[in-house]
Each structure stands twice: as structure tokens, then as C-alpha cells.
Image: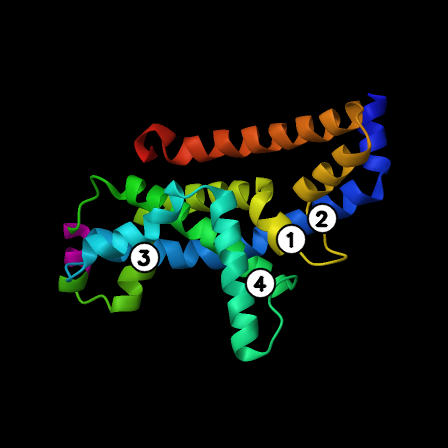
């Protein structure tokens, strides 16, 4: 147990954990509403280019994170050159990158949870005189609740454990836990890193079990 105590005693792991949790919570808070709205539009909507929109939203799931991180880094550099501003190394740039991780997973899990839902329930509410916002709040969102919760859990996991995007886009003085673990590995090889990794795996496993409680993950993959 001394290695767990040693991990907690190191400032880079404590500050990295706090920074990672903050980043994951913010990215989840932004990405889940956007992804949930997009999933509902894809599931219920009838519009030209629906398959194209669905492919664009789900496409990042097929792209390795290192490629996505490199592409975002190059894109940010070009934006910096075009608008004479700083994006790489800022909190806003890192949050925007992690939001791109959360939206595709939210769309996929919400779509999986909405399979088999009866659209006539919403139609009945409208026919009985319910205003649009009442239908959304009292009918639509409760039907999407399981997918939204699962999307939030999985989005948090994806942001929490991501290394590639953070490594390329993180700024000085703000290091996430995966980056702190990589930095530690450069100079030391001892069970402290294994202790941190064990705790990280346990947290992710708990969140995965909670996610599977609301949406069976086999339906999403």
C-alpha cells in the first residue's frame, strides 16, 4: 500500500487528477447536450443529407486519437497564423478538443437507447395541447434519459483517460493525469505508476458498469 500513498503524496499526480476531472466535467457538460440534440435530430428528423450528417458526427470514432490530435494541432496553428491569436496551450483549445471526443460517443449511445421508442407518445402529447417545450421536457427528455446518462458517463471516461489530444495541446502549468503519468515514466520506473494506473482502471471500470446499467454497451458497438 505504500506505493498508493507515494502516488497521493506526489503533487504532479494530485494536481493532474484535479485538472483531468475538471477538463472531463467541462467537456462532458458541453458535449452531451450537443450530442443528445444531434442524436434526436438524426433519429426523428427527415432531411436531406441525414446520412452525411450522421457519418460526420460518428466519423471521429474511427479515427485514432493520435491522428486526431495531430490534425487538431495543425488546425490550431493555422488558425493562430490566420487570426494572430493563441490557441495551442490554452484551456479553451484543450476543452474544444475534448468536446470533439464527447459528441460522437453521446450520439452513438443516445441513438442506441432510442431504438424501439414509440414516436406516437410525443404525437399524443401534441394532440392533447401540450406546448413544444412541455413535450420536450416531460416526454422527450425522459425517453432519452438512459442514453443521456450513459453518454455522459462514457464521455467523461473518454476525456478522463485521453492522452494523445492532451499531450499535443496542453499548456504549461496545466498537466492532466495521463500526461503526468507519461512524464513520470520518463525518469522513474517503480510501482508508483502502477498504483496510479490501478486507481484509474478501477474508476473507469465503475463508470463502465454504471453506463451498462442504462444502455447495454453491446447495442452501441
Which residue is nearer to you in this view: 34 or 82? 82
Of callouts 4 and 2, the N-terminal one: 2
**Residue bounds of the magenta highlight:** 120-125
Residue 102 position in % (x across, y down): 46, 50
Which residue is nearer to you in this view: 24 or 53? 53
Q: Are marks 4 and 2 in contact (CB under 8 Å)?
A: no
Dot 4, crowdedness within 10 Å: few (<14), some or many (≥20)?
some
Q: Are marks 2 and 1 in contact (CB under 8 Å)?
A: yes
Q: Secondary structure at mark 3?
A: helix
Dot 3, crowdedness within 10 Å: few (<14), some or many (≥20)?
many
Q: CA distance from mark 3 to mark 4?
A: 22 Å
Residue that carries the numbered disc 3 in the rendered image: 38
Question: Image height check: is 218 above or below 48?
Answer: above
Q: Main secondary structure of the magenta part?
A: helix
Q: CA distance from mark 1 to mark 4?
A: 14 Å
Q: Depth-wise, is mark 4 or mark 2 nearer the camera?
A: 4
Q: Residue at x 68, y 47 (%)?
A: 176
What count of labels does the image hold? 4
Residue that carries the numbered disc 1 in the rendered image: 22
Q: Residue at x 57, y 33 (%)?
A: 204
> What numbered label is drawn on residue 93?
4
Residue 151 position in % (x across, y down): 43, 45
Asked if residue 122 lies in the magenta stretch, the reply is yes
Residue lying farthest to the bottom in this orientation: 83
Q: Residue at x 66, y 61 (%)?
A: 89
Q: Quadrant of the C terminus?
A: top left
Report whether 113 appears left or right of 82. left
Of callouts 1 and 4, the N-terminal one: 1
Q: CA distance from mark 3 to mark 1?
A: 24 Å
Amino acid at each position: 500500500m505504500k506505493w498508493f500513498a507515494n502516488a497521493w503524496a506526489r503533487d504532479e499526480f494530485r494536481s493532474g487528477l484535479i485538472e483531468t476531472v475538471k477538463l472531463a466535467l467541462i467537456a462532458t457538460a458541453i458535449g452531451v447536450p450537443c450530442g443528445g440534440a444531434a442524436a434526436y435530430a438524426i433519429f426523428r428528423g427527415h432531411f436531406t443529407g441525414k446520412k452525411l450528417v450522421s457519418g460526420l458526427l460518428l466519423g471521429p470514432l474511427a479515427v485514432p486519437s493520435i491522428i486526431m490530435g495531430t490534425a487538431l494541432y495543425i488546425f490550431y496553428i493555422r488558425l493562430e497564423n490566420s487570426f494572430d491569436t493563441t490557441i495551442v496551450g490554452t484551456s479553451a483549445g484543450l476543452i474544444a478538443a475534448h468536446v470533439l471526443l464527447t459528441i460522437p460517443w453521446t450520439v452513438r449511445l443516445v441513438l442506441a437507447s432510442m431504438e424501439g421508442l414509440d414516436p406516437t407518445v410525443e404525437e399524443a402529447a401534441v394532440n392533447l395541447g401540450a406546448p413544444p417545450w412541455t413535450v420536450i421536457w416531460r416526454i422527450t427528455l425522459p425517453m432519452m434519459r438512459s442514453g443521456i446518462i450513459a453518454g455522459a458517463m462514457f464521455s467523461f471516461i473518454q476525456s478522463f483517460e485521453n492522452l494523445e489530444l492532451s499531450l499535443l495541446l496542453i499548456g504549461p502549468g496545466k498537466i492532466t493525469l495521463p500526461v503526468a503519468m507519461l512524464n513520470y515514466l520518463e525518469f522513474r520506473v517503480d510501482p508508483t505508476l502502477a498504483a496510479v494506473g490501478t486507481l484509474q482502471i478501477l474508476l473507469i471500470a465503475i463508470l463502465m458498469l454504471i453506463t451498462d446499467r442504462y444502455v447495454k454497451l453491446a447495442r452501441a458497438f
